[in-house]
Image: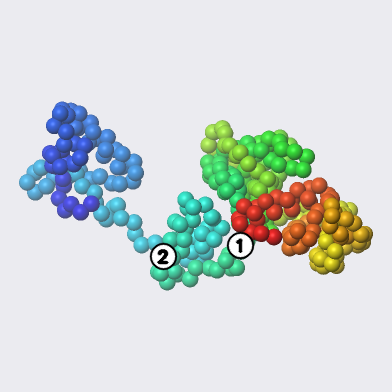
Amino acid sequence: MSARQYVTATYLRQNVVGYTDTGKSEESFKRMLERDKADLREMGIPIETGRNPDGSEGYRIDPEQYSLPDITLDRSEAAAVAAAAAVWHEPSVAAVFQTAVLKLQAAGIDVATDDEIGVTHGGSRRSLGDELAITALLSAIDAGRPVTFMHRTTRGTRARTLEPWGIVTDGGRWYVAGHDRDRDATRTFRISRVFDVKAFGDAGAVTVPADADVRQIVADAVAQDDAAPGTVARVWVAAGRAHGLRRIATSATPHRLGDDAGDLLSIDVRSRSGLRRLILGAGADAVVLEPADLRADVIADLDRLIAQGVTA
């Protein structure tokens, strides 16, 4: 990098570790040199061949061709980097993103805040299983490959085959949307219920429809889930506790849960996400009995909080 003149093959053979083995023939040395030059070029490092003033032929790396120019980001581009740093917690990349944000700020770029870029902390934090699923899904999306994965529901666990289009958050939860080959329909899956993601097939096999708005697809799916008519939740609450749940209940009947006195509440489910938050906020003073899928959701929420070291 710092050489002003072209470095000759003879100099390299005499001074570079790996080339200095006197047992190597001239032909063997030349093959090694050509291989290493090809490897450097494949990594994007330009190798120049030229002659020095004394007529000797050699090689060098031109710093002007190799060095990256100064990078200037506008506010939206800087916000994209900030968003990535804010939502990604995997150790292998989190430090890189945080360093990038610090460098942007040091360069005088006004990096957007979490509120401005729509990042939600707390609820959007993920377990290691979520991280692994997201990593595998993003790789598949980038390569345009379909995936298989296991999907947990209240009815059990089953394999799914999906052509993934994108990953977004909604209400602090992560979702993947795409074409479900099993049902031949557009589907949305909550990533906390997905595991053992495996890509298969050729790269480029998945084509995202030009009119596919992944964020809207997920929002519509979540809204439909929240708006399911006629759903009534049965939630046990401890005596004199969980007043937020009591206020929205349509009825309350004295009921013991094991040795604990309390009431069995009937609650019309208008917003599943809102009801989940109230139940989680009540901690051990609230237990979902019905419906089974809501109970499974709350248990999954509690497992995630425990994995993050948060106690209800």
Q: Earlier in the sequence, mark 2 or mark 1?
A: 2
Mark linked to residue 37: none
Q: Judge the density around disc 2: few (<14), some (14-19), many (≥20) Cα neighbours within 10 Å.
A: few
Question: Tag 2: residue type?
Answer: Lys
Q: Nearer the viewer, residue 136 or 117?
A: 136
Q: Residues within 10 Å of mark 1 (few under 14, many from 20)?
A: few
- At x 57% / y 34%, what residue is drawn? 200
Q: Residue at x 65, y 56 (%)?
A: 305
Q: Nearer the viewer, mark 2 or mark 1?
A: 1
Q: Position of residue 283 (x, y in %)?
A: 74, 60
Measured as percent of width and height from the top left, residue 179 is found at: 67, 41
Mark 1 is on which residue type?
His
Where, quadrant-wise, is the C terminus in this rendering?
Answer: bottom right
Q: Which residue is denoted by mark 2 in the rendering?
A: 103
Rendered image coloring scheme: rainbow
Residue 155, percent from left and from top = 78, 40
Relative to 25, 284 lies left or right? right
**Where residue 44 sits in the image (x, y, percent)?**
33, 46
Count of marks placed on residues: 2
Q: CA distance from mark 2 to mark 1?
A: 23 Å
Q: Is residue 178 above or below residue 117?
A: above
Report the side of 160 relative to 74 (left or right): right
Secondary structure beneath dot 1 equals loop
Residue located beneath label 1 in the image: 121
